[in-house]
Amino acid sequence: MTEVHGGASVGGGFGRGKNHLAYRSYQRELLGSEIPRVALALLAITLLFVVFLLFFDWPRVRSSWGWVVLLVLTPAGTLLAARLGLARRWPYLVALGTDAAYTGGIVAGLAAPATPTSGTALFISVKMLASAMLLPWHPAAQVASATGTLVLYWVVGWLGARFVWPSADFAHQVTGPFFAALVSVIAGLRMEHLRRRLFQETQLAQERAEANARFAAILSHELRNLLGAVLGYGELVRDALSSPADFPKAREAADRQVALAHQALETIQVALDLSREETVRSGTNQPLDELWEELRQEYALRPVPAGVRLRWDVSPDLPKVPVDGTKLKLVIRNLVDNALKFTPAGEVRVRVRAGFDELVFEVSDTGIGIPPEKQPFIFDPFRRAAPEDFPQGVGLGLYVSSRLVEAMGGAIQVQSAVGRGTSFEVRIPLRVPRQREEGSSE
């Protein structure tokens, strides 16, 4: 058998698979919805800029009005494209086209002799920073936008002899837009990181909400089974008490009924803690050796599938240290019940040993095994190894077990091979009593 899982694992990371594709789809949709708003803001700012030019510098605008018209038509054209649905269909193409056209208008103003280079450099810088902050770019698109703007500005300014070396304004004319481009790229990457993290948190919250809803929906089903067994034993007690000769049988059924009722209450409390994403509260303290003896007696009363043998290989020298009986029993029951369910014939074996500060137990079977492609997900909620062959169950046993082992500070591992069986090993730290620690140190 090959070990495929090295510890209790709940939930999944934000990988480059399905969630990555979901984020890219979300990003495209977000960009498509933001383009019209940004274009409208850009049009309003541009019109305000034109009014300013007409009022304060009409002769200069009259001598070179083409670039001003291009600045106005670019956001207007983007609004039209958005109205036609092109912004949502090809959001990156429309955004880059708008960015390139608006940059072209600014640079065209630089080519006009009457336009001051300092004003163009400032306008270019503001445009790049606004682009980074307003548009939810893909990082590559943001780099392409900043680089294209910067190169076009430099080429036109140099070929048009607008940059004069040496001069007092040369450093501002050349390096100002460069630093604006650098800041815009850094800002774009930072905003991309924040958007991605927000998306991850939103997705995780939705998954947890869905899991909790499903958990609550099936909780009644699981409790119905337990309470149905309690009711059945109660009816058995009632019928047996009608005949004094059946008193031992009635006492056995009553004991089993009480045990099942306690188990139902423990299951309810753990289920509620897990559904609220709370830390599972501590259960009853119970000596380790007594706990295993109770479990063996409990399963001695349970029916075992025909052709399957349940063996308990418990070390005779288990220490009398206190353990969280509530959690530990639920973990063992889940693992043993799973092994019995997925073993049509053969053996289910429980091995238990304890060191000075650690409990190690293993539940192994000779059943159907777990396919390799399903092994990484068996500790996730509502994930089942063989739903086709075994329709009963909802896929919560291993999830609950891993959470409980984690709450006790332990680890759970699985080894499995299809057709050869499965083995779960659990390691849990033990709390050594103070008097034992003092006695060992003397």
Image: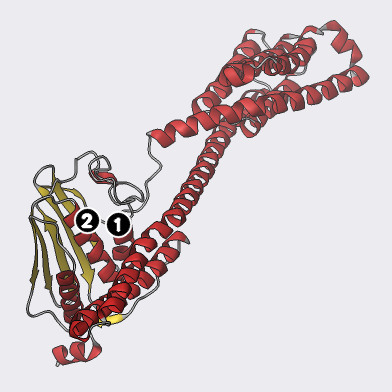
Indicate left or right for 32 with 288 as reference: right
The color scheme shown is: secondary structure
Please state, as top left, top right, bottom left or bottom right, where the C terminus lies in the image: bottom left
On the image, numbered disc 1 is attached to which residue?
Answer: 397
Q: Residues within 10 Å of mark 2 (few under 14, many from 20)?
A: some
In the image, 185 versus 301, the foreground residue is: 301
- Visible residue check, residue 177: no
**Residue 434, position as x, y percentages in the image:** 24, 88
Q: Residue at x 23, y 69 (%)?
A: 428
Task: Say which quarter of the image contains residue 15.
Answer: top left
Instruction: Give the label on residue 52, or none.
Output: none
Identity, as a three-letter code, of the amino acid under mark 1:
Gly
Q: Residue at x 54, y 31 (%)?
A: 27
Q: CA distance from mark 1 to mark 2?
A: 8 Å
Q: Is residue 438 above or below residue 395?
A: below
Indicate left or right for 215 with 91 as reference: left
